Image (cartoon, rainbow, N blue to C red):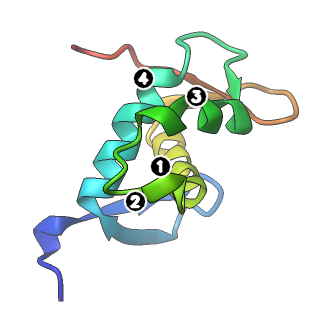
Amino acid sequence: MPDSADRVEIENVVSPHHRQKVDRTKYMAMRKVLLAVLPNDPPGLTVAEAKDALLPDLPDDLWPGGAKAGWWLKAVQLNLEAKGVIGRAAMKPVRLFRRVELNG
């Protein structure tokens, strides 16, 4: 069983009472890369555009050939939306942008 320090609890903006524990290393890596590719202002990027932009920067040892990157992108996206770190423009398809300025 993994040590609880190796896990991080995430939320889901769509299902506010649903929490899930996921691998901390993968979560933090995806969070870093996602925030790096999202623009600061709306309307932002579609989820597909964000995925295309972040795939080249994902660590290959965590996502060989981008495997399962879509699931992790969505999990991190929904958690960061729940925490107010990223926003969703009021249009379709879903477009994402940073709400919080990155520090360093």
Q: CA distance from mark 4 to mark 2?
A: 20 Å
Residue drawn at (35%, 68%), measured in percent from left and top? Answer: 22
Q: CA distance from mark 2 to mark 3?
A: 23 Å
- The disc placed on residue 88 is none
Which quarter of the rendered picture does the N terminus lie within? bottom left
Query: Horizontally, is 73 left or right of 7 in the view?
Result: right
**In x, y percent, where is residue 26?**
33, 56
Query: Vertically, is 27 above or below 44?
Result: below
Mark 2 = which residue? 10
Mark 3 = which residue? 53
Q: Secondary structure at mark 1?
A: helix
- The disc placed on residue 36 is 4
Q: Earlier in the sequence, mark 4 or mark 2?
A: 2
Q: Secondary structure at mark 3?
A: helix
**In x, y percent, where is residue 14?**
65, 56
Residue drawn at (54%, 62%), measured in percent from left and top? Answer: 68
**Cβ atoms under marks 4 and 2 closer than 8 Å:** no
Q: Amino acid at mark 3?
A: Ala
Name the residue nearer the viewer: 73 or 16. 73
Residue farthest right in this picture = 92
Q: CA distance from mark 3 to mark 4?
A: 10 Å
Which quarter of the rendered picture does the C terminus lie within? top left
Q: CA distance from mark 3 to mark 1?
A: 15 Å
Q: CA distance from mark 4 to mark 1?
A: 13 Å
Q: Earlier in the sequence, mark 2 or mark 3?
A: 2
Q: Amino acid at mark 4?
A: Ala
Query: Horizontally, is 104 left or right of 81 in the view?
Result: left
**Cβ atoms under marks 4 and 1 closer than 8 Å:** no
Residue 25 occupies which quadrant of the picture? bottom left
**In x, y percent, where is residue 3?**
11, 77
